[in-house]
Amino acid sequence: MKDITLNSPCPCGSGRKFRDCCYSNQELYELNLAISIMSRMQSVEDLIKYASPLFGFFGENKKGVEKSINLAYICWQIAEKPNDERKAMLDELIKDYAAGGKRTKADAAAFEMLVKNMVERYLTMFPEKA
């Protein structure tokens, strides 16, 4: 974890300097820090749960799981965008995939269906975040 100085942005996320925010109340600072860490842990758990349909798609070895998590994260980021931006980003991702390497039309179509399903999965799993 990066060292926090008095002039650093407060880790509670208020946007104020640490000295002007949580520094004066160490208990509040420690509570906010714990909440921040727990929320990040929940996000990691959510990402793994969200990515589970992709496990095995790129292989079951470590590299395949990493690719699955990376693709899930990309789809997660796209799903959080407004509808028009989401569509444009999806189209660009699909186009880039189809243009890369020795991919058949069937591979590109399968990838397109996969990423669209992952975006829909996000919207279903986390309607409050979309």
Image (cartoon, helix red, strand yellow):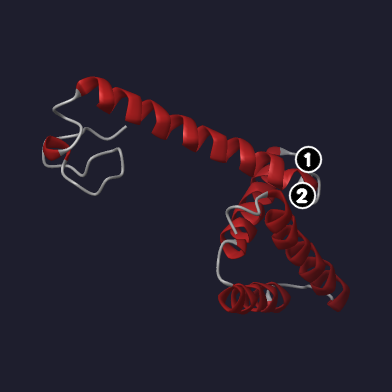
Q: Residue furthest front?
A: 128
Image-quadrant location for residue 20: top left
Residue 88 on image: x %, y % = 60, 79
Q: Residues within 10 Å of mark 2 (few under 14, many from 20)?
A: many
Residue 60's tag is 1
Q: How many marks?
A: 2
- Residue shown at 41% from the left, 30% from the top: 35
- Residue shown at 77% from the left, 49% from the top: 54
Report which residue position mark 2 lands on: 54
- Residue shown at 77% from the left, 51% from the top: 58
Element under label 1? Answer: loop
Residue 16's tag is none
Residue 6 on image: x %, y % = 11, 36
Amino acid carrying label 2: it is Leu
Q: Residues within 10 Å of mark 1 (few under 14, many from 20)?
A: few
Q: Quadrant of the N terminus?
A: top left
